[in-house]
Image (cartoon, helix red, strand yellow):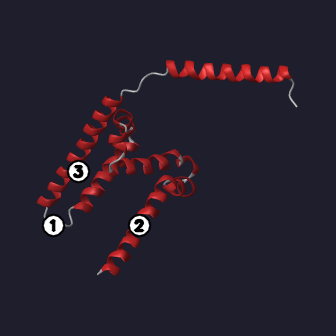
Amino acid sequence: MPSLKDKQAIKQQQALQQEYKDLAQRQKPKRPVVRNVCVAFLVGGLICVIGQALAQFYLRLGFSVEDVGSPTTATLILIAAILTGLGIYDVIGQFAGAGAAVPVTGFANSVVSAALEYKREGLVLGVGAKMFSLAGPVLVFGTVTAFVIGIIKALLR
């Protein structure tokens, strides 16, 4: 059982810890939330404008309206993967935050970044195994959800 002196020391330590937390909270710089939201909106919107321009390009090449989404998405993913490999997408992501992370380009960035991080471990155990460490759960969730929604749609017919 702690003595009275030990209890006082514990209380004093807790008071010092709380004082430190308060001081650290006061010194922490304020986040520019409005600026971050505006930049994320503008960069995310610019990515979508680029996607729309690509869709119009593929429409002019003869793709149907129903089929234009696949090459547009694939092209956006390719561009994001190349920019990630060159280190440019990371700069865009640091500047834009969620504006660069939310579109499909952010997903491509996460896959390529993981692959680049583990390339020293080899193509199979490094790149191949680690590339889908972040993307794997997203792909599984998307596949399972699509399957369940397809069954529900078939049952409702």
Instruction: Decide: few, some or many residues near mark 3? Use Cα within 10 Å; few <14, some 14-19, many ≥20.
Output: some
C-beta proximity under 8 Å, tags 1 and 3 = no
Q: Residue at x 50, y 19 (%)?
A: 26
Instruction: Identify residue for label 1.
Output: 64
Instruction: Decide: few, some or many residues near mark 1? Use Cα within 10 Å; few <14, some 14-19, many ≥20.
Output: few
Instruction: Decide: few, some or many residues near mark 2? Use Cα within 10 Å; few <14, some 14-19, many ≥20.
Output: few
In x, y percent, where is residue 138?
A: 44, 58
Q: Nearer the viewer, mark 3 or mark 2?
A: 2
Which badge, 1 or 3, comes first in the chain's sequence?
Answer: 3
Which badge, 1 or 2, comes first in the chain's sequence?
Answer: 1
- Nearest the eye: 126 or 53: 53
Q: Amino acid at mark 3?
A: Gly
Check residue 145 in the rendering and tell me which mark sits there, or answer none: 2
Q: In the rendered view, would you say 76 is above or below 12? A: below
Q: Is residue 31 left or right of residue 137?
A: left
Q: Nearer the viewer, mark 1 or mark 2?
A: 2
- Nearest the eye: 81 or 73: 73
Q: In the rendered view, would you say 132 is above or below 36? A: below
Q: Amino acid at mark 1?
A: Ser
In x, y percent, where is residue 58?
A: 17, 59
Q: Residue at x 13, y 64 (%)?
A: 62
In x, y percent, where is residue 109?
A: 40, 47
Q: Secondary structure at mark 3?
A: helix
Which badge, 3 or 2, comes first in the chain's sequence?
Answer: 3
Check residue 51 in the rendering and tell me which mark sits there, or answer none: 3
- Nearest the eye: 38 or 43: 38
C-beta proximity under 8 Å, tags 1 and 2 = no
